[in-house]
Image (spheres, coloured by chain):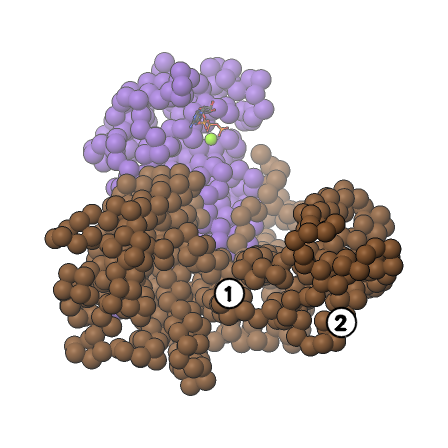
Amino acid sequence: MSEAPGTPGVTPPPGDPTESRIGVDSWVAQAEGRRARRRGPARLLARGWEWSPDPVKLLLFVGLASTLPFWLNEGDLFNFGLFTLLYVALALGLNVVVGFAGLLDLGYVAFFGIGAYTYALLSSSHYGIHWPAEATIPISMAVAALAGLILGSASRRLLGDYLAIVTLFFLQAFAAFTNTANPTVHGVGLTGGPNGIANLDPLTFFGYKLNSTKQQYFFLVIVVAVVAAALHFINQSRTGRAFRALREDPLAAEVMSIPVNRLKLLAFVLGAAIAGLCGTIFAASFTAVTAGSFGVPLLILLYAIIILGGLGSIAGVILGGFVINISSQFLAPQNDHPDVKRWLFYGTIVLIVALMKPWYRAVLVLAATIAFGYAVHAIVSATTVATWTTGAPVAAGSRSIRDGIQGWVVMPHATATGPHVNFNTCLYIGLVVAAVTVRSLSGWWRLAALVPTLYLTAMVWENILAQNPSVTALILFGAMLIALMTVRPQGLLGTARVEIV
Amino acid sequence: MAEPQPSPESTQTKPLLELEGVWKSFGGLVVIDNLDLAVNENEIVSVIGPNGAGKTTLFNLITGIYPPDSGAIRLDGESLVGLPPHKIARRGAARTFQTLRLFLNMTVIENVMASQYGQTKVGIARAMLRTPGMRREEREIRARAEEKLAFFGERLMGYRWDQPAYSLSYANRRRLEIARAMATEPRILLLDEPAAGMNPSETHEITELIGKLRDDGGYTILVIEHDMHVVEGISDRVVALDHGVKIAEGTFEAVATNPRVVEAYLGTSAAVTK
Ligand SMILES: Nc1ncnc2c1ncn2[C@@H]1O[C@H](COP(=O)(O)OP(=O)(O)OP(=O)(O)O)[C@@H](O)[C@H]1O
Ligand SMILES: [Mg+2]
């Protein structure tokens, strides 16, 4: 028992109990600091952020967010401002369950829906009830919290994957209830089925109506600030420490006098109450609720926000909400920007190639790909019928870019007949084969195989993806998330967690 | 069973921790076999035994991680059987883990503050409003955590408090586990191999610390230990387990020379060194 497997080789001489190991410990602990120092002035901003006190951060958020209405028009404020803040508030609630307590809750969006429907029933002509917001907000929150309590007590003993399945089932059951079941109460369908409930009242506090997007936006700024501050205070209290402890090691937490099951329930209820609050604001701002709004796509968006921002970090979730919502709105088909998407696409490819080491390989591959493209294009146009290369790129922006792409990428003219009807399918198959080949090779062979693969990727983009804006939006969105998570696995403002040491 | 050799105190005072006829089996394998054990107030009792003897399982039964199949476990006369672990911690039994289970991504002081959850009261409403009462309790929690860490001298002092627990050396993690258990304000401390993985000087230090925990801290201590130098240095009484059966009990001298104990250890890696 005299050998110390866990301690580094620096052991003081036996029999000298006063010998201290401060040197070793502090050296290990300061590793992060040394790493940070080495990166130089580029990290000044990060340092400044780290050192600024929490109230300053909150004021920074309120200050910046309050400027939005002055430089965005009504429509943009709705899409980029209001929805961002709504997602931020929702993600803050999800962060309590997933980030603080470490529970994989996939039913969270249902509580958002419950809040929205509660508001719709209590403030619309559906049943002729027009209660003011100071009554409906607490009621919606209480109803959602009660649903959270019920789901939580039903599933709090379930862990990990089982919890995820049960909560996901709850979400689907909620969707089925609102969409299909739609029980008839007082002669009217309770949830309005697929049509939902329309013509909701705007939020009205003590007779003061929040009619305009601007008013609703400022109300949301206050809501986000209050929720963030409240959660921050909880995080710093004994409850917050207990959440963190149970996320780290539930068994050790339980043995250290922390009632783990009760805290899990509390996390569920707290998250559900925040979701319920967001539901009322969403319903009132949108003036309608439909079952389709509370589904898995929204859940994915919220998870993307908290993971990107950094699980457990309140400031991270706020930043993540802005990044995710603005980029997803930007990429959405209804706000199409095809030229920007093309730049994003080629930019990402060049960036990925540029990560290769040493740097001259990256230059070599890019140059070879460009040359390869011109060669293929020349051969194809010289040996086949003209329709193989007369396709036009979608929304190329300027003329020179269009000509460049047309002279480099083989693009058949889009006709329903002719020798190239199966061209798109062949492209996909070719790309998959090429990608698999690249993975199975190594060294210079790999570089050589990379060149036609990149060219095929460009062909797939120009011939297929660029023509389908909704698909490209999702692909770019996914690629962006993957790229960000590769660079910062802990999320934008999250702290890196050490699992095994 | 072993010939009972109760120490003088145990006949005079009522035991703080008492186990009577405790059984535990895992899928047919009997791990704790009709065990009787009593630990008196302010006593240091060591549990020894070869690997797999059931020592850690004994701690798991006391702290409520598993219920016993049968038998009674009492702390200060009140039964612990069937209580969830967090309630047992509130009653005054705290432990460390053989395979360290710190809250690694929390800071050192937060580890010691988190385990005070059971004795503190402020709920989320007061936390959200940061009422004066809440802030006072926070200050008390912090002061108590600092007091517990101060027990370990310069080892866990000052600048270390705000470092994440994963940055600690192995020996310091063992110390932090003890500090975290102390912060639940227990009456009895259950230490599972506190000297495992420590070098000779650290082992010596832990031996002194356990004595100090009893003398200055006022804790009653039940400790599992393989290192016989430590066992000899700290124990008022030693209990030897083998295959869940108590094979000897008494002073260190008596147990270490007991033929059944020597036999139990023969052929296993940890030999009784004396
Ligand atoms: N949860 C469990 N399920 C099944 N078997 C278990 C469980 N816990 C312990 N055991 C078995 O019980 C026996 C005693 O284990 P225990 O951990 O109590 O031994 P120990 O005396 O602490 O040994 P060591 O000195 O190695 O720590 C072992 O055979 C072990 O495999
Ligand atoms: Mg053990």
The residue beneath circle 1 is A332
Picture residue at 54% right of the left edge, 69% below the top: A336
Q: Is residue A321 above or below residue A20?
A: below
Identify the amino acid type marked 1: Ala
Residue B10 x, y percent position in the rendering: 28, 29
Q: Mark 2: give few (<14), some (14-19) or many (20+) Cα within 10 Å.
A: few
Tell me the amino acid under the disc marked 2: Asp
The circle drawn on residue A115 is none
Task: Count neighbours of disc 1 (C-alpha within 10 A) and say few if under 14, some if 14 to 19, many if 20 or more.
Answer: some
According to the picture, the residue beneath numbered tag 2 turns out to be: A403
- Helix, strand or loop under label 1: loop
Read off the chain for label 2: A
**A56 to the left or right of B159:** left
Residue B176 percent across, percent down from the top left: 46, 50
Q: What whole-number distance in Å separates the C-alpha atoms at marks 2 and 1? A: 27 Å
**Chain B shown in which color?**
purple
Quarter of the rendering containing residue B188:
top left
Circles 2 and 1 on the same subunit: yes
- Can residue B107 be seen at all in this image of the molecule? no
Q: Which of the 4 image quarters holds residue A480?
A: bottom right
Placement of A205 over or under B153, stated as above or below: below
Most foreground residue, A251 or A421: A421
The numbered mark 1 sits on a residue in which chain?
Answer: A
Q: Nearer the viewer, residue A198 or B263?
A: A198
The one of B109 and B9 positioned closer to us in this rendering: B109
Mark before the other along the chain sequence, 2 or 1: 1
Going 22% across and 59% down the picture, which residue do you hit? A118
- Please provide percent x and percent y for residue A41: 65, 76
Q: Among the chains, which one is brown?
A: A
Q: Is residue A181 visible?
A: yes
Q: Tell me the quarter of the image containing the C terminus of chain B.
A: top right
